[in-house]
Each structure stands twice: as structure tokens, then as C-alpha cells.
Image (cartoon, helix red, strand yellow):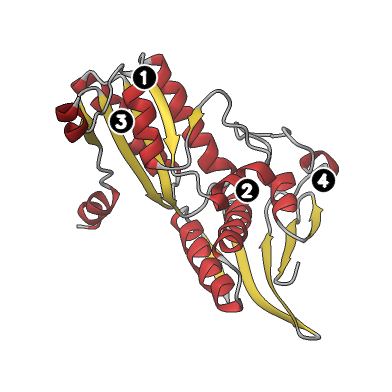
Amino acid sequence: MHIKIIEETDIAKVVQDVMIAASEIGFNKTKQFIIATAASELARNIFVYARKGDIYIKDLNVNGRKGLEIIAEDQGPGIANVKLALEDNYSTTESLGIGLPGTKRLMDEFKIESEVGKGTRINIKKWLDL
Amino acid sequence: MVKKKEALIDVNPIHVVWEGILLLPVYGVIDSKRGQDIMESMLEKIVDTQSKVIILDILGVATVDSAVANHLIKITQATKLMGADCIISGISPAIAQTLVSLGISLGDVETQATLKDALENAFKMMDLKVIETNQAVVG
């Protein structure tokens, strides 16, 4: 599933679609909420920092292990210091500065690639059996 | 036409549940516009009704990401500035776990799992007591 982030209301679409995908895989209500929050965080990051970008929602099935993967991709300004951005309470805007480190804690796997002037790609996964 | 439709969806009801006690159920996805709308309508209602305790019930929110939490914190801060106390209720297990994982502290905001508990707390704050009438008759 692919959702384009162009305006703020697209974040709501991401939340809804992730909730549905997570429930279809078999995640319980609490996990659905947690995954949707992580996805919302990534979608909002795209909207706030890169203005536009893409969210991909993928079902995972690796040797019978089920899960959900969310990829957030943008061609925005990129993150100059990824290590710093992953620290709590670091923010270049007025936000709380817990979005990225928080998202990492909410999910089982978190991968970030970012290059200044080129964009950012974040990949998060949640496994059903963990 | 589009604006009108948006306005209809965005209406956030605020209930006067008791003299001086307001209940504001927050549900769905909270974006910056809705966060601002909720804050404004609530502050106006506090003045209109001279309310002292506000219950913000968040059981129906779709997510509590850091931006939503930021809105909630700002709403409670503004309420305090107006001399009213704010209780956040509807902290489901999912919301509690998410807030802890995100590392969001709601600070000194009073929180309650259920709306029932929040209402009880609100009555206490207003020095009100609910009594069973049959008990009163016996007594």
C-alpha cells in the first residue's frame, strides 16, 4: 500500500490504513495503536520537515513469521546529524523532540538513512510474535 | 461548500456535565488545525460557563504521537492559565504504553483511566459529594 503525503490530512489516511493492515495481520488493539502512532510520527515528520513524501505499508511474512513494515521516504532536506536526531529532546522545531527516538522505542526494528540535500528514508518493523 | 463540510466534521462537542465541570471528548486524528480548534472552543466555553474543572477524555483518539501529546499539554497549560483545573481521562492501556514508550511525560496533569474516575475526582475538587438516595432515606 502506498500513501502520498502532500497535505496534513494525509497523515490521517496513514493512521487509518496502518490500523486496518495491523488488525488484518492479527495485532491486538494495543499493538495496532502503537504501530499507528509510530506511522503517524513518520508521516508527520515528512509533512513538517520535507513537505511531501511517501509512506509504504507492507505485510511481512518471513518463514512464517508475520509482521508489518512501514517505510517513510522523502526527498526533503535530510537530517544533518542522525545520531543527534535520535536523541531524546532534540528538536530543530518547536516540537517535543521525541518523535524519532520514540518511534524507535515503539517498534521492533528501526532503520534510518539520510543525506543532506537528498532526503530521508526510514524503515520500521513490528513482528507479531515479539 | 467544502468549508461547510469540514466545519460539520470538526465540531467538537463540549458538555457541561455539572455546574462548573466541563467534559470535552477528543476523538479521531488530531492535527494542528483540530488541536487549535479544540483549544479555542474550550477556552471560550470556560469563560462562558465559569467552569473550574475540565475533563479531557481522550479514549477515542486514533493515536497519541508526540505532536498530539504536545497539543494536549498545551491545552492543559492554557486551561491552568485561565484558573481551571484539567483532568485527562480515557487513558487506555494502549495510550499508557504508547506514552511511556515515546517518553512523553504529561507533567503534573491529573490523569485517570476512566471517565467515571475523572468525574468522581472532579466532584471532589468542587467539594461535591454524590450520595445514594435510598441510603439517605434509611439514615
Q: Which residue is mark 3?
A: B42
Q: Are marks 3 and 1 on the same chain?
A: yes
Which residue is located at x 49 percent, y 44 percent? B91
Left or right of A25: which side holds B132? left
Cα separation between marks 4 and 1: 46 Å
Count of numbered tags: 4
Q: Residues within 10 Å of mark 3 (few under 14, many from 20)?
A: many
Disc 3 is placed on an element classified as helix
Q: Which residue is mark 2?
A: B97
Q: Amino acid at mark 3?
A: Met
Classify A16 as above or below B4: below
- Mark closer to the observer (2, 3): 2
Q: Amino acid at mark 1?
A: Met
Q: Which residue is mark 4?
A: A82
Left or right of A90: which side holds B34? left
Q: Are marks 1 and 2 on the same chain?
A: yes
**Residue B39 visible in the current orientation:** no
Q: Residue furthest front?
A: B138
- Pinpoint residue B57: horizontal percent, then vertical percent: 39, 41
Which residue is located at x 17 percent, y 32 percent? B133
- Pinpoint residue A123: horizontal percent, then vertical percent: 74, 63
- Pinpoint residue B120: horizontal percent, then vertical percent: 35, 31
Q: Are marks 2 and 4 on the same chain?
A: no
Q: Amino acid at mark 4?
A: Val
User: Label for residue B125?
Assistant: 1
Given residues B104 and B2, the one toward you in this image is: B104
Classify B20 as above or below B35: above
